[in-house]
Amino acid sequence: MDEVTLFVREATSGGSIQHIEEILNNVDGIERVLVDTDDGELKIEYNNKHVSKERIAITLQQHNYHIM
């Protein structure tokens, strides 16, 4: 299992966080999503045989989230 850390500008409010978690938890290969609401940090544990960190970032961007 691999882990990637991303900072998402919108991941500091309840509604956005819930939406981000919902999006990512529906991606095949993502095992766990942890969000730090203070700075928008996402720690994502995933199986790199099913999904890449690039695909995770693209998925967020396709839903209009901005990776810093």
Image (tube, grey):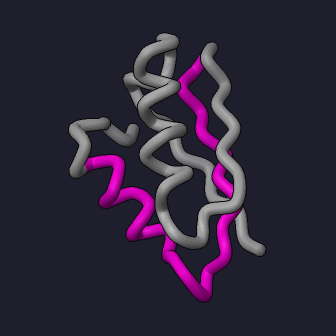
Magenta highlight range: 39-61
33 with respect to 16 (left or right)? right
Q: Is residue 48 above or below residue 64?
A: below
Q: Position of residue 53 (x, y in %)?
A: 50, 68
Q: Position of residue 3 (x, y in %)?
A: 70, 62
Q: Which residue extends farthest bottom?
A: 49
Q: Write the residue at 51% across / 76% down.
A: 51
Q: Position of residue 30 (x, y in %)?
A: 61, 63
Q: Write the residue at 49% across / 50% down.
A: 24
Q: Write the residue at 67% across / 25% down.
A: 36
Nearest the camera: 1 or 25? 25
34 with respect to 29 (left or right)? right
Q: Write the residue at 50% across / 25% down.
A: 17
Q: Is residue 67 above or below residue 28?
A: above
Q: Is residue 40 magenta?
A: yes
Quarter that holds the C terminus:
top left
Nearest the camera: 67 or 56? 56
Q: In the picture, residue 38 is in which quadrant? A: top right
